[in-house]
Image (spheres, helix red, strand yellow):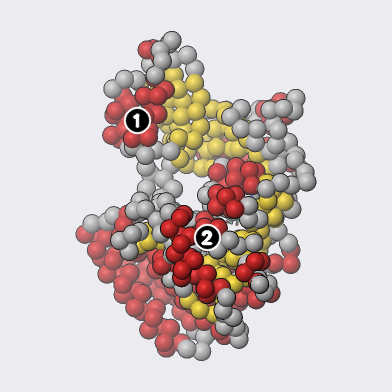
Amino acid sequence: MFMENLDIAKFGGTSVANYEAMSSCVNVVTSNPNTKLTVVSACAGVTNILVELATGACNDERLEALLAQLKEIHMQIINKLANKDELTAKLDKHLLDIKNLALQANMESSDALTDRIVSHGELLSSTLIVEVFKAHGFKAQFFDVRKVMRTDSKFGRAQPLVEVIQSLCDEFLAPLMEQDCIVVTQGFIASNYEGQTTTLGRGGSDYSAALLGEALNAATISIWTDVPGVYTTDPRLVPHAKPIDELTYLEAAEMATFGAKILHPSTLVPAVRRGIPVYVGSSKEPQKGGTWVRPTTVSHPAYRAVALRKNQTLIVLASPKMVGASGFLAKVFGIFAKYNQSVDLVSTSEVSIAITLDAGTNTSGANSLSEQMLQELREFCHVKVEHNLSLVAIIGNEMSKVPGTTTKAFDAIANYAVRMICYGASNHNLCFLVDEDKAVEALVDIHKALLE
Ligand code: ADP
Ligand code: ASP
Ligand code: MG
């Protein structure tokens, strides 16, 4: 039965940006008889507009301008469809709801309200692509993912409740996979037990597709985007970047964690749990091929890729009491945990510890550095905070086992001031923390030295 080979196809914002792009998605989905479930992001640009509306900082003029932009983006798709009036009425209903919520945000914004507002992006794109499937003569049905995608109540960056998602998918979604009809649903959005809308954090649609893939026991998860696969680095930053045919889960996860935007950092987690291969390709140019991400690969190069992660915050904590004392690190990390701050890199010296923080990946884009936390740290050590830093990460294999691996990497970064280095925790990466304004140059040089 085809369920055994089920493929889930996820399309990102650019892939559903307009009627033509949506038509390419229809082509991709219908070319593979195993693709029964389509997961879509909001049309390109829409989430950014909705996030701005949710800030509560838009005056009347700005609010109307943003609503007009939303109308235009969706109308250029609706204008190509037969049931224009019916769809325009649906769009207007969404816009009215967005407007009312944005006015509410002007009184008092919150992460919960932001999630309600941004969810309209995915609800609209999924509604419209169903019509595009039909316009091309294919059967398609809309499915509200909030019926099955259950999360906790951390609005803006909610955590999926995997077992509940599994049983809800068994009940509501799996039966639809048996029907002769493409099911279209939303990435990124979800709901908590109270039925309130939550989101998985920016770029979270990849993660949604993987979670649904896990719950439905899919054979493959396909991430269709605007580049033909995962490259040795962001091809927009380095035109010499080369496509990679296959990657291990570990390599891809390291790349995603260290800033390769092509995959949301959590995407591989559900895939790994079930051993589901993940394919990455271009919806516009599927014939160009793509990247398979699997448990193992034939090649294991020492240098596989380079990634860049901006917006890093460095916190240096110094205390003479640290000498020979035990429990200092435990105390520091306890405070980070209390304030829910995710620590990325760590390096220690005799009297100090340097930590980098993951600056704001929640849907509202809020920088999560808590002043209260810094105050608590200041009570027992000297605290220095530096912003505007970027991480340049080299991702590879067995790095610490091959002599000379680091020498080449250090030579490549010889012309840059490096604020912090992280190496040794994993055999798969070597990271440099550099000034934001030098980061792209450093990335280009490292790529040239190690991968070209
Ligand atoms: P989508 O909207 O489809 O989710 P994203 O913009 O989130 O697309 O991710 C695709 C983008 O990721 C590409 O356009 C590219 O600029 C960027 N990117 C970053 N690192 C890489 C990489 N190593 N390989 C390919 N693309 C990358
Ligand atoms: N639309 C959401 C965003 O822009 C989710 C996604 O695209 O994956 O972040
Ligand atoms: Mg993305």
Residue 97 visible in the snapshot: yes
- Residue occupying image coordinates x 33% and y 35%: 338
User: Which image quarter is the N terminus in?
Assistant: bottom right
Cα–Cα gap, marks 2 and 1: 35 Å
Q: In this view, does 358 lie above or below 99?
A: above
Q: Position of residue 358 (x, y in %)?
A: 45, 40
- Residue occupying image coordinates x 43% and y 83%: 87
Instruction: Residue under label 1, please give it.
Output: 335
Q: In this view, does 381 lie above or below 189?
A: above
Q: Residues within 10 Å of mark 1 (few under 14, many from 20)?
A: some
Residue 122 visible in the snapshot: no
Q: Where is residue 182 in the image (x, y as percent from the top left)?
A: 57, 76
Q: Where is residue 127 in the image (x, y as percent from the top left)?
A: 46, 76
**Amino acid type, mark 1:** Ile
Instruction: Residue under label 2, please give it.
Output: 215
46 or 401: nearer the viewer: 401
